[in-house]
Image (cartoon, rainbow, N blue to C red):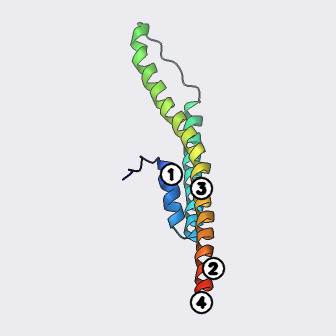
């Protein structure tokens, strides 16, 4: 017996989307777009707040400023990565569910056609 290989998250989501009714897929796509868009706007707001000029503290020992610079860089890095991820997911996840709704609608039409073909 052949074992099925591991599937990616996108394949699993597409498989789920094809099993749901087409109208539910479209609703999920709309809500996913709105949710990721709002999340993306939140990250943009955070990035704009980070880009404001902040006075640099002057310290006697320059090495003492390194932990502050590292912490600021890590905080900004998370916001930048979150901004990029939500920008991609804002279009990818709804697109995936729209493809699933098309597949689901086609499958539903085929099932109706078979049902009518079997009737005497």
Report the residue at 43% width, 14% height from top: 65
| Numbered disc 1: secondary structure | helix
Distance CA(mark 4)–CA(mark 2)? 10 Å
From the image, tell me which residue sits under label 2. Answer: 113
Which quarter of the figure is the C terminus placed in?
Answer: bottom right
- The x, y position of residue 23, in whole percent, is 59, 70
**Closer to the eye: label 4 or 2:** 4
Give the CA separation, mark 1 to mark 2: 28 Å
Q: Is residue 16 left or right of residue 84?
A: left
Report the front residue among 105 and 111.
111
Callout 1 environment at 10 Å: few (<14), some (14 to 19), or many (20+)? few
Viewer-side residue, 26 vs 34: 26
**Distance in Å between CA atoms under marks 4 and 3:** 38 Å
Left or right, residue 107 beside residue 5: right
Residue 6's place in the image compared with 112, above or below, is above
* Mark 1 or 4, closer to the camera: 4
* Disc 4 versus disc 3: nearer the observer: 4
Answer with mark 1 or mark 2, whichever residue precedes in sequence: 1
In this rendering, the label closer to the viewer, 1 or 2: 2
Which of disc 2 and disc 3 is earlier in sequence? 3
Front: mark 3 or 2: 2
What residue is pinned by disc 1? 11
The x, y position of residue 105, in whole percent, is: 61, 70
| Residue lying furthest left | 1
> Around disc 2, counting alpha carbons within 10 Å, would you say few (fewer than 14), some (14 to 19), or many (20 or more)?
few
Q: Mark 3 or mark 4, which is nearer the start of the sequence?
A: 3
Q: Are marks 1 and 2 in contact (CB under 8 Å)?
A: no
Residue that label 3 marks: 94
Outermost bottom residue: 120
* Numbered label attached to residue 24: none
Label 1, label 4: how far apart the Cα atoms are: 36 Å
């Amino acid at each position: 017996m052949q074992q099925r290989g591991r599937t990616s998250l996108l394949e699993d989501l597409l498989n789920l989307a094809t099993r749901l009714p087409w109208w539910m897929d479209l609703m999920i796509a709309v809500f996913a777009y709105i949710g990721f868009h709002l999340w993306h706007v939140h990250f943009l707001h955070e990035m704009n707040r980070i880009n404001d000029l902040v006075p640099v503290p002057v310290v006697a020992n320059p090495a003492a400023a390194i932990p502050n610079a590292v912490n600021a860089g890590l905080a900004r890095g998370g916001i930048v990565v979150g901004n990029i991820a939500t920008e991609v997911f804002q279009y990818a996840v709804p697109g995936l569910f729209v493809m699933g709704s098309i597949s689901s609608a086609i499958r539903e039409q085929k099932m109706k056609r078979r049902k009518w073909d079997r009737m005497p």
